[in-house]
Amino acid sequence: MWTLFLAGGPVMWPLLLCSLLALTVIIERACFWLRLDMAGDEANIERLLDAYYRGDDWRKLAERERSPGHGIVRRMLLSGMAHDGFSSVKAMEAVAQQAVRAMRRGMGVLDTIITVAPMLGILGTVLGIISSFDMLGQAGINEPQAVVAGIAEALITTAAGLIISIATVFPFNYFNSRIENARDVLEHYGTRLEMAQGKMRPAQEGETTRPAQEGER
């Protein structure tokens, strides 16, 4: 492998850097998604929403059924409930945006490597062909063995760039699909809480106005 690497020429060094950087980001993102508790305990979340809708003490329920992973959905809902009547939607959006930013960390690096690695391979191909013609001009057409090193350099760098790009695009697309699914889950639960708050406000307003009307009578 080391001999093959050296035969690829100087372009193999930036390709090696790209491969190590992509591997580092992929491992870090894989660990991130393994640790991430997207929905927390869904049963606990449903009980939390039911308690909030019934007007029970949802704070005590949230404290008693605290999920070990402190799921993103749970944090978003608790933030929206705590700001009920005062920018509840914005509070949930702030938590969701912060979570999505954490999910997208490192994705730009993978996207760049997917684009740059094949271009570096093409650059190595061009340099290898230039080297081949230079050797051919010096040795003459009667010694074709002189161009073998340049042709090998061209083929090795092209193959290396394509391998790095192909190996990176699969986890990149997988992580992107996880991000999209996470957005859908956050939007689903955020909409449910917003609808519950919209149904509760008329009842709360009726309770506050009724004693005043009775007092006037």
Image (cartoon, grey):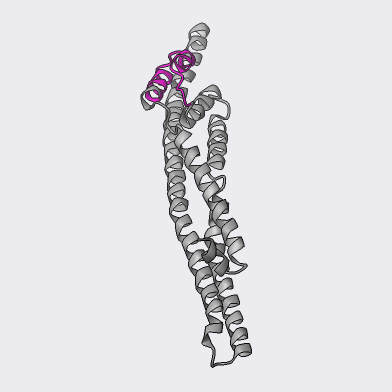
Image location of residue 141, percent across then percent down? 55, 92
Q: Is residue 156 above or below residue 41?
A: below
User: Which quadrant would residue 131 be assigned to in this image?
Assistant: bottom right
Left or right: residue 15 compared with residue 181: right
Res 145 visible = yes
Q: Is residue 110 above or below residue 156?
A: above
Foreground pick, 22 / 3: 3
Residue 112 in sight in this render: no
Seen at 47% across and 29% down, the residue is 71
Is 74 in the magenta?
no
Could you tell me residue 53's position as x and y percent?
A: 41, 21
Q: Position of residue 1 (x, y in %)?
A: 50, 61
Q: Main secondary structure of the magenta part?
A: helix
Q: Closest to the observer: 205 or 139?
A: 139
Q: Residue at x 48, y 65 (%)?
A: 162
Residue 63 is inside the magenta segment: yes
Q: Quadrant of residue 134 in the image?
A: bottom right
Q: Position of residue 203 (x, y in %)?
A: 44, 20
The mark total stands at: 0
Range shown magenta: 45-69
Which residue is at a point 46% across and 31% down the rendered structure image? 73
In the displayed orientation, state which residue is furthest to the left.
43
The answer to which of 126 and 78 lies nearer the viewer is 126
